Amino acid sequence: MEKDPLRGNATISMSYPASYQAVDDQVANGEQFRTVSVSSDDDMIDITTTGTVTERSIHQDEVSAWHCGVTIQGMQGESDEIPGIGQYDDFHTIDWQRDIARDRMRHRYIIKKKQDSIWDLIKGAHDAWSGWVCVLLVGVSTGVVAGVIDIGASWMSDLKYGICPQAFWLNREQCCWSSNETTFDNGNCSQWWTWPEVFNQSREGVGPYIISYLFYIVWALIFAALAASLVRMFAPYACGSGIPEIKTILSGFIIRGYLGKWTLIIKSVGIMLAVSAGLSLGKEGPMVHIACCIGNIFSYLFPKYGRNEAKKREILSAAAAAGVSVAFGAPIGGVLFSLEEVSYYFPLKTLWRSFFCALVAAFILRSINPFGNEHSVLFYVEYNKPWIFFELVPFIGLGIIGGIIATLFIKANLYWCRYRKTSKLGQYPVTEVLVVAVVTAVIAYPNPYTRMNTSQLIYLLFNQCGISNSDNLCDYNRNFTNVNSAIEIAAAGPGVIKAVWLLVLALIFKLVATIFTFGFKAPCGLFIPSLCLGAIMGRIVGIGVEQLAYHYPHIWVFSGECSTGDDCITPGLYAMVGAAAVLGGVTRMTVSLVVIMFELTGGVRYIVPLMAAAMASKWVGDALGRQGVYDAHIELNGYPFLDSKEEFAHTSLAADVMQPKRNETLSVLTQDSMTVEDVENILKETEHNGFPVVVSRESQYLVGFVLRRDLNLAIANARRTMDGICGQSLVLFTNTSPLQTSGPPPLKLKKILDMAPITITDQTPMETVVDMFRKLGLRQTLVTHNGRLLGVITKKDVLRHVKQMDNEDPNSIQFN
């Protein structure tokens, strides 16, 4: 039986499972064949063999070469002939397999060319180090931007209270550096003028209080109005925290403009303004978004990353690590945060690059020294007291309360965000920001703990009481006669009681304010408000335990450590554990959270309390509500995110989910019997993102898969550059030319055909299909039965099916 080269060629190129029948049944699996010649235009690959057709009868490299639809030589020749091939449209999912295969091909081509000349050797070296250079640039820029934001935000925050007349660009702390006074009243020195003093009033009294109050509200309004207006006018994507969207983008979704230069500029300026307005939000979450914008912009300097979406995700993962690194001065915590919370695909290479990027960013920020205290965060504290074994009980208790507060917050915030989306409120974003800002400022000012900057409040709550502390929180009945002696445990004075009541009010106010603030149309982060809620709760519990130990020192739990009269309970440590508990409950982080907390406080000996609280809060949170706040917002906005943490527990099959259903027709292209006009009609009539290519409509044997975007580009390019291509030209997805000589020349599109699409059978369990989509990052998979094509399952179908099975609305997913 004589076999023509075409058949041999097709047989081999489709030597992936379940598709070797696709030519016809003449060349069966295991049958002998004599010669197979696979030649590309440049004769780069030429295999002449005698042997047996098996499922894997060719070299893996050649498969991935065909898989991309480009020959090895074609790295320059063929793929660049048609501009735009391999790119994606807005709100589309990327095909990880295709992009990674394209990058492997490009890499092999560069390695192969290295021997040719010195210039190619240099190009190879540049290619090898470009990833490190890119993350170095990202790290440096992130550090600089973070330094600018920290300095700007601290200056503008202090502007609400007063001004430095000698040099208006200094904040309150810097203004007082030159002062010779030894004690400052509430941090104010004579160099720093409060607003009443600017108008020749005294500092204290009813009149000055009203002036201060008014200035506080006016500045808050100005800053909030600026932040919201900038976002509305220049970069609508700069609102919110950005982490839910970053998670979605890293899982392989395209949101054009979300990581652009305008978003970067407006988010950076907007977050300074929003924090300075005294709103209940932080700048730490948006730092991750800002860092990813920087990563995205720098990736375009290196075509290896700029042109390949899957490779670009590696840079973005490293950038996210740098963002957390500069937000908390916690480089290792940043890497773990990127790994645990935001990244979808995190190979070892990306881990090292993220580590390097976070290190560089933290180093640059430390060099800038924005707070003038040798640390990268405002609330760095150092503890050196051991904790008592019994204290694990209140620590776990804090974890449980933290989980409950977090669940309350997530449920209430989601309810409010849903209401905002569905009601008229969503049409007035700037007004909403202004109303929230005014209400926050009016209620916050009378209470000294809500009036101050949230970071300063956290610092105050984390701090230990010493000789120099003048705050009410440290109003104990102590007499410091000997400076060197240990601080003794003492009864709480009236100041402490008053402070605790103010803190309870602050806790309620902050919780309610954060519910209404998170998710509105200005940049806002959630880390700092969560830490603040937890720190208030922890400090109150800590004071309670401390007083218990003072009044009942002889109970067996305190008898060892507290019987000496030294201060054996540290309320500041409880504040720190409480902060970790609430943040863990809100975001459901565990490992990265503990590392961030001990990098923040330098307290390695408190890892066990932190772990206990984080774990307890995560369990309570998971028991009361399935998702952390970021996953809940991803679902609320309908982003196509397949969570790798969740199990698919249903028993459906691929045949139940595939499109079209059994009795409908499937839009396909044939390999050699359709004209350009036929193809264009199919493109006009359907909305599909890609089309399976079959041998013929009758046989429905699968040849490959072609993307809609590539088809459109290839046809438009052919009409522009080739003579004689018209509506009657045959479209060929094979290498051979047709026999007839008359008529217009054919259009050969084999190079845009993916000849190794991932296929499954109609009886594959959906559990396996969902796993394939998660782990391989698929965009679609083709469903066959006995080698004949039945239908297609896209990522959208999988997401809708998961929603349907969970009894949720399957049409809530945003997708083009």
Image (tube, rainbow, N blue to C red):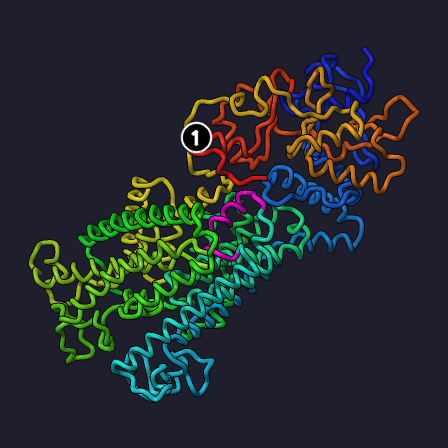
Asked whether, in this view, residue 122 is left or right of residue 323, the answer is: right
Extent of the magenta region: 238-254
Examine the rendered structure and indicate whether residue 168 appears above or below residue 666.
Answer: below
Residue holding disc 1? 648
Examine the rendered structure and indicate whether residue 214 appears above or below residue 385.
Answer: below
Residue at the far right in the pictured view: 742
| Picture quadrant of residue 205 | bottom left
Asked whether, in this view, residue 255 is left or right of residue 370, the answer is: right
**Can you give x and y, in whole percent of width and height, for residue 809 in the image?**
45, 34
Quadrant in which the C terminus is drawn: top right
Asked whether, in this view, residue 624 is left or right of residue 705, the answer is: left
**Can you give x and y, in whole percent of width and height, for residue 231 in the image?**
52, 60
Examine the rendered structure and indicate whether residue 404 appears above or below residue 741.
Answer: below
**Can you give x and y, in whole percent of width and height, for residue 783 in the image?**
59, 23
| Residue displayed at 36% across by 77% down | 161
| Residue displayed at 83% across by 39% down | 719
Mark 1: few/some/many CA within 10 Å (<14, 14-19, 20+):
some
Circle 1: element type: loop
Examine the rendered structure and indicate whether residue 380 appears above or below residue 31.
Answer: below
Give whichever of 366, 797 is nearer the camera. Answer: 797
Is residue 382 visible in the rendered image? The answer is no
Q: What is the three-letter code of the residue carrying label 1?
A: Phe
| Residue displayed at 73% across by 54% down | 123
| Picture quadrant of residue 441 | bottom left
Task: Let me know if residue 240 is in the magenta part.
Answer: yes
Give whichever of 55, 447 is nearer the camera. Answer: 447
Task: Let me know if residue 131 is in the magenta part.
Answer: no
**Can you give x and y, in whole percent of width and height, for residue 54 in the image?**
68, 20
